[in-house]
Image: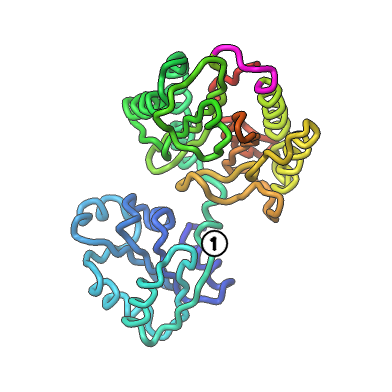
Amino acid sequence: MTALDQLRSAMRRAGVDALWISDPANVRAISGFSSGKDGKVLVTAHGATLYTDARYTVQASEEATVPQFIARPPETYVHARDAAGGLRVGFEADHLTVALLDDLRDHWPDASLVPVRGLVHGLRVTKTARELDAIRAAQRIADAAFAQVRPTIRPGVTELDVALELELAMRRAGAQSAFEIIVASGPNGAKPHGVASSRVIGDDELVTVDMGARVDGYHSDMTRTVAVGEPSAELRRLYRAVLEAEQAAVAAVRPGMRAADLDRLARDLLTGHGLGEYFAHSLGHGVGLDVHEAPGLRATSEEVLEPGMVITIEPGVYVPGVGGVRIEDLVLVTETGSEVLSLAEKEQL
């Protein structure tokens, strides 16, 4: 069954006759068009059309697996009106802006516009062999960049220096950075999503590096916390507790495992070390065309792991005024268990 066949089945279950796709990653997933931020796709029971503008005429003809219509709004909406007229048309509620929804209502007065969630995202949860090849390539580049730059993480270097060297290393290897690289040293380590700053790395600190590469639209995601000098006994205690929780959760990954149970396993271990209150986020997430996608590995999740999912396992503790630790692996769920894709060295403190 093709992706379009699967999507049409999902549309029928959701009670819509057509779907207007605006999320860039979903545009790419359904049409193959890699500049999804400048494209939309209308899928009906009998057809699918990619809408983009004249800047992408050649690119769309080379990449798209569905027919294309090259124009800008309002011509886009006028062209789609005949296909959408009289139908229940789903729109991606978690992406389409109010202004663009008003445009659709103005141009499709005979259509019934219905908010939907997750129809395309659900098809992206498990990865094909081609997708896995791209994710593996992205992670290999990230591993190599980290190994190259690790010796430069030392006192007197700024967080921005480290982030720049990591990005340059990945670009030289043919990839882009998957997201804004996090380099959080010393007390900045207490910020789970603190960006690299001009802070100078000092002696006897921990430095958290969260990075990933993007290859052919697919992402990797990995975090390592490293020691500069001789961190205090308390910082080493935090590190060892997080490493224990991370390794235990990775070892538990297998098909049929509930995402919520994985989160609980790591959280309970950190709570046992008196650190549960400092674990400020969920255990992990899916990775693919988006760096954060389904499944969500959080306490409230109803999702169950399946072969072909690519997820992160990333427990962390963040102590204000002291610092923090996060260790993250990229993991493929296999038929019999799991495969760790991120092979960069983890320090033993």
Q: Which of 230 and 285 lies nearest the eye of the viewer?
A: 230
Residue at 52% x, 57% y: name it.
121
Count of residue discs: 1
Q: Is residue 324 visible?
A: no
Q: Which color scheme does this rendered protein use?
A: rainbow
Residue ID for mark 1: 118
Q: Which of 280 and 203 lies nearest the eye of the viewer?
A: 203
Q: Is residue 218 left or right of residue 329?
A: left
| Residue 114, placed above or below residue 332 | below
Residue 308 among magenta residues? no
Q: Is residue 295 visible?
A: yes
Q: Is residue 8 left or right of residue 58?
A: right
Q: Position of residue 237 (x, y in %)?
A: 71, 22
Residue 231 among magenta residues? yes
| Residue 124, placed above or below residue 278 | below
Q: Which of 281 and 175 lies nearest the eye of the viewer?
A: 281
Q: Is residue 265 left or right of residue 85?
A: right
| Residue 83, placed above or below residue 95 | below
What segment is highlighted magenta in the picture? 229-235
**Residue 167 falls in image quadrant:** top left
Q: Position of residue 318 (x, y in %)?
A: 62, 35
Please name the amino acid that badge 1 sits on. Gly
**Residue lying at the far front of the rendered structure:** 321
**In the picture, which quadrant includes the C terminus?**
top right
| Residue 119, placed above or below residue 107 | above
Query: Which secondary structure lies at badge 1?
Result: loop
